[in-house]
Amino acid sequence: MQYIVTKQILVSLPRRWQAADMFTIEHEFDSTVITVIDEGETQLQEDVTVNVFAECVTVEQLDPQSEEVQYLQLSHQQIRDLAAALDLPEGIYRLVPEKS
């Protein structure tokens, strides 16, 4: 594990992440807003903003060619599936809750 200190918060990062990766988290009245900032050296992309509401999650990013913000709305289940899929090999999967 790698550890960094930012704003007096100790964060444990998985090895696949780099300390240069940057994002912000803000808690609004009706949502949590996460902004992912691309700080790479080449082919920088526009910031990605994720709004987590009680009923859904929206993802938005400015399209530099059209200069319009592109929106995507996902359910919380779709977000859980997407997070699980990031570390799985090619295949077809169904997520099933663990029985306690």
Image (cartoon, rainbow, N blue to C red):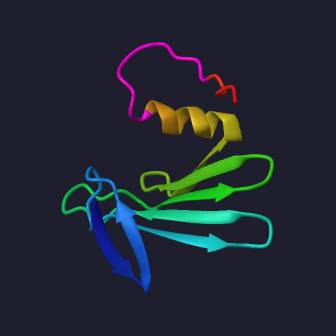
The residue located at (60%, 38%) in the rendering is: 80
Start and end of the magenta stretch?
Answer: 86-95
Residue 69 in the figure: left or right of residue 87:
right
Tell me where residue 7 sits by quadrant: bottom left
Residue closest to the far bottom: 8
Percent from the top left, x then y, of residue 34? 56, 63
Extreme top residue here? 92
Point 37% across, 18% down: residue:
90
Q: Magenta stretch mostly in which secondary structure?
A: loop
**Is 29 placed above or below 71 here?**
below
Nearest the eye: 9 or 46: 9
Q: Residue at x 58, y 18 (%)?
A: 94
Q: How many marks?
A: 0
36 or 42: nearer the viewer? 36
Question: Image height check: is 69 above or below 98?
Answer: below
* Residue drawn where x is 61% and y is 73% of the image: 26
Q: Position of residue 22 (x, y in %)?
A: 38, 68
For the N terminus, the quadrant is bottom left
Question: Where, quadrant-wise, is the C terminus in this rendering?
Answer: top right
Residue 92 on the magenta span: yes
Please, which residue is most extreme toward the front here? 100
Q: Quadrant of residue 88?
A: top left
Residue 33, position as x, y percentages in the image: 62, 65
Q: Is residue 85 magenta?
A: no
Closer to the camera in the image, 4 or 60: 4
Left or right: residue 55 versus residue 24 is right
